[in-house]
Image (cartoon, helix red, strand yellow):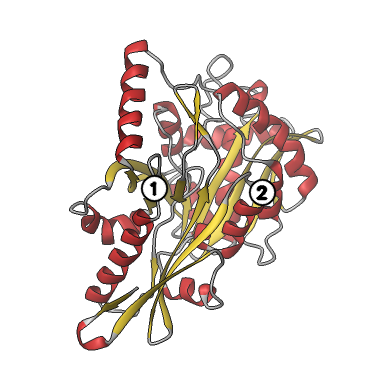
Amino acid sequence: MTVSCDSDGAFSLEMSDRAPGEWTDLLARDPAAEYTHSQHWTNSVCDHQPGVGAVYLTVRRSGDLVGGLNAVGSPSPTKIWGLPMGRRRLDSSFEGTSGGPVIAGDLDKHEKDLIFGLLVDALGARRGGLLGSCSMVLSPAQEERFGRLLCPRSGWVRHDAQTAVVSLSGGIDQVEKERLVMNKRNERNRGLRRGAEVFATDDPALLKEYYGIYHQAARHWGIDPVPYPLLRALLGDDDNRVFFTCVRLEGKVIGGHLNLHFGQKVLAWNGVTDPRYARTHFPATLCFWGDLVEACRRGAAWLDLGGSGSVGTLAGFKKYFGAELQMRGLYVRDSSLTGLLRKGRDLWRGKRGISSPQKWHDSTSGEGSGERS
């Protein structure tokens, strides 16, 4: 597909199941690019998430790669109202992360808008057949810059998708002094005095031990856990952009966060703590503190603690660490049949009073951790 761009020639749109050779260079040209735009992220998801394949949409001008969008497509059957239905999903995000287009930052506003539209329309056009659906989550920076362009585009439905972000300006000393509230400093100190330790590591054995806690939490939530091989593959990033914040007590892992670092941002992506120690050693507080320390050590400007869904206590817990809410946009484009089925399912759930899964720490703690982010 080729689209004219006034006096600057033409843009050509291509699709592939693998990233072009200049993909890393393109990410370096976009200050809004995140870890989830990287090849290692997409390759890891596709290699270890059953039934998933990569989709790369790219835009070139005179051979120069100026825009792209990575997504994962799943042809696997899903269930609607408990019935297996062959359904095609195409998502430029995964498990609460951001996605969406990456666009060279040295282009002018008109060119960026045109490239964004090309990529978004191309994603929507590849959603599949009768039961097709596609989605993407725009980061706060992308939402502010491009969200307005999606509102008038037919077929895309927007949902708020807030995320909690902590500024790391001034380094860890200033973060502790100005953003960490006193009761969280006290919890951190009490946990450490009682023998808990927190540190950043890339040791897969510790990640494996942590996975047992996470797997139990996923069962409690009623969700399919992210496969351990995927977490392990991410931790093995050759560019050292992934680290595991581990909380350990007497040699036993009692909580952790898997963090993704790209550019100026660290994302605390996959995390949970053992509720049995919540009121004695405060592993959730120690996890967030460990994330802050390592993110500052790496020179990041922001720590993204992710969303909180409908769990108000988790959002409040993150504010104790100086987190401010920023707005992301979740955009969904369903086929007509999928849209009707989705509305019917939501109506049915509402009439039956089906609520969100019980929180992992509800019966054990008021610490406010261990929730899906």
Which residue is situated farthest in the left direction here? 152
Q: Residue at x 33, y 35 (%)?
A: 337
Q: Quadrant of the N terminus?
A: bottom left
Image quadrant where residue 157 sits: top left
Amino acid at pointer 1: Ser
The label shown at residue 48 is 2
Image position of 353 with respect to 71: above or below: above
Amino acid at pointer 2: His
Compare marks 1 and 2 and give the one earlier in the sequence. Answer: 2
Image quadrant where residue 336 sits: top left
Which residue is situated farthest in the top direction here? 352
User: For numbered disc 2, what is the local secondary structure?
Assistant: helix
Q: Locate residue 55 relative to residue 319 in the image: left or right.
A: right
The one nearer the camera, 217 or 200, is 217
Labels 1 and 2 touching (C-beta < 8 A): no
**Residue 239 location (% of width, % of height):** 66, 67
How busy is the neighbourhood of tag 1: few (under 14 within 10 Å), some, or many (20 plus)?
many
Q: Residue at x 39, y 46 (%)?
A: 129
Residue position marked by numbered label 1 in the rendering? 135
Image position of 259 with respect to 339: above or below: below
